Image (cartoon, grey):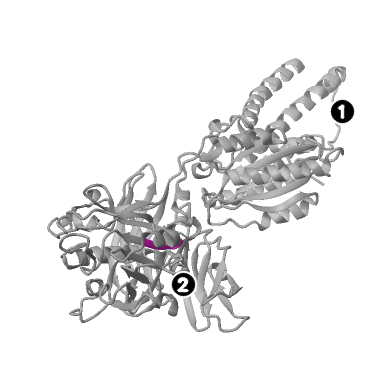
Amino acid sequence: MAPTFAFWQLGSVGMLGWGVAAALPILIHLWSRRKYRQEAWAAMAFLLAAMRKNSRRIEIEQWILLAVRTAILLLFAMALADPRLSLLSAFARSAGQTHSVLVLDGSYSMDYRAAEKSRFEAAKELARQLVVSGQQGDGYTLVLMADTPRVVIGQPAFDREDVSQEIENLQLPHGGANLPMTLAQVESLIRKSHERTAGSAHLTRRRICIFTDLQHTTWEEVKSADCRAMLGRLENLADLEIVDLGQPGENNLAIARLQVDQPLVAAGREVQIQVDIQSYSRDNRLRQPLEILVDGQRVADERFDCPAAGRTTVSMSHRFDAPGEHTIEAHLADDALALDNRRWLSVPVRDSIRVLCIGGRPAETKHLAIALAPQAQSFRSIEVSEAPESRLVESDLAPFDCVAVCNVGRFSQAEAEALHRFVSRGGGLIVFLGDQVQLENYNQLLVDDATSRLLPARLIEFAKTATYALDPLEYRHAVVTPFRAFPQSGLLTTPVWKYVRLAPVEGAKIPLAFGNGDPAIVEMQVGRGRSIVVATAASPDSVDRSTEEPTPWTALPTWPSFPPLVHEMLRLALAGRGESRNLTVGEDLEGAVPVTTPDATVQLTGPAGFSERLPIQSGSPEGRWVYSAATVSGVYEAHIGANVQRFAVNVDPREGDLARLEPEALPSQFRREQTPATDEPIALAASETGSYFRWLLMAVLALLVIEPCLACQFGRGRG
């Protein structure tokens, strides 16, 4: 049964204790009527006769004064308790049998804490209050608005205690929220409910109540055509209401990025750790503390200044002495939104970076191998293996980090599939063309099928033999950016006489071009890996024999710009290796393992004591495991026998921008009323909570003026 005064909310319940003081005038009145001893006195006879004549009037006057004095104390106690009439709950009590769809915003900005309570906790409290104050027979559906909306209660539930418990059990994910998908899900639930109850008198009214902070990242799509269309349909099915839990003008500081300057780290090699801090504040933030930890040990304690609404970078160098699984953590001092104050980075450290070079002829990879790992280098952080084309299908490519293909004439279906599998799982691929390349074979197996596309460009034709210069395209791409500071490095003077004309596919990028505008290097992401194609050759053995004198394709392999260019391409190609271990909340954790037994499993552990055993999906030549429910940020570990793989799952820093959509900008389908400005963390945009403190205090002041006036008037009358 709902409480009688469930629609009243009290800002300070304890202040009602002052209402006990209202008994004082009554006690004084009763005390004044205590027994007394009568004495005969002749003069009193005249007074008693006069009082008996006016006794009725005097009694009424005394009762009026007693009521006024008692009301002063009662109203003062009520004013101190700050009563608020919740129209949301009152409306629910008077609306009859209603199907309420409760939608709670699960984006991590709802963890913002203006006081001890987060917005999400406040939303749960308000949702429970709405349920408790409902009428017998009302039904409730519960949806958590997240990146992928979660229907907690699908069909209308009528047990208010069960619904309240489900609301209480909700946990805030560390991701964002998808408004269009949530509205689509709500529309589906409303329509199913409508179909089930069509023609009956039960649940005749439907309402959708969204508890949210109106954070702009989530609500920026509310004005899109799709959302407006859905809101138009929902308006015909149910009442739309917004419970606004946000306040304008909040500030926040977030770690936007944590990275090392090497996509894959070799033991003993110094790297730069870079931390980007984003300010979502109107003021400069000075001398802010930042901790950097490696494997749980503090390695730096920095102070930084961050400009208002700007970004700053803190860097430090570090050397990983031993190979293995390592973790870097950056930590800001906690503020009102603590979830984006920590960020992790998984850094698998190798003895060396392994590159497999496949040549279409025996000497095709010689210059590339020397450029990657010079023989004079005593300590090699890059290990190069040279092999013929048959190696692509004869052995597993998983131990390698990058595969470089040089002037391979044609590929078989099996070779193309092996390369695509390797790259899509995070490996790097660099393809140099040459005089043996069969254009149609490359296009058919590596480009044309969009579902298994491996190369970032179609091969159109062999360019006419001539002299071509290279154009770095203003050094915009990461592959050529380092050359900007070294104009004498030889990049712009690299001789090229022949190449394959390339047509980049959708989504591909061009780091380097020829002077006539044709792409010289094209790259794109394939799955978790990266694919790069170079229009010319990696060896002087590629020759155009159609000319009067055989003409080599290029002098690039022997030019001074070749080693740095190759290393920059390798850096880009390896980017996917680290990305597969560093994810955003909501992305899949996955890995490859050798399948030892049919019932082999992976033990996955994570934040807050999380532990789950995952099955290994059999495949050839390896097994795969996948975990798709990582909704909490932190470090996860996959234990496969004695081996451990670490994964860093981080929040999307965009959600840390607390800028919000003002209620006045909401589409007209939402019911809302204006509310006075308040510092309270809860304000209702659709159904408001009205405060009566001022009105009660004004009533107290009015009675304080009236009481002495009445006492004076009544006393004069008796005189």
Observer-side mark, 1 or 2, equals: 2
Element class at badge 1: loop
Whether residue 342 is visible: no
**Left/right of residue 98 with respect to residue 670 in the rendered view:** right
Q: What range is drawn magenta here?
A: 526-531
Residue drawn at (33%, 56%), measured in percent from left and top? 522
Residue where numbered disc 2 is placed: 646
**Left/right of residue 406 with respect to residue 204 in the rendered view:** left
N-term-proximal mark, 1 vs 2: 1
* Crowd band around label 1 with a 10 angstrom C-alpha radius: few (<14), some (14–19), many (20+): few
* Residue 40's disc number: 1
- Closer to the camera, 518 or 122? 518
Residue 431 screen position, x and y as percent: 33, 64
- Closer to the camera, 141 or 269? 269
Residue drawn at (61%, 37%), measured in percent from left and top? 684
Spatial CA span between label 1 and label 2 = 102 Å
Residue kind at label 2, given as amino acid type: Arg
* Crowd band around label 2 with a 10 angstrom C-alpha radius: few (<14), some (14–19), many (20+): many
Residue kind at label 1, given as amino acid type: Ala
Residue drawn at (47%, 45%), measured in percent from left and top? 658
Main SS of residues in magenta: strand
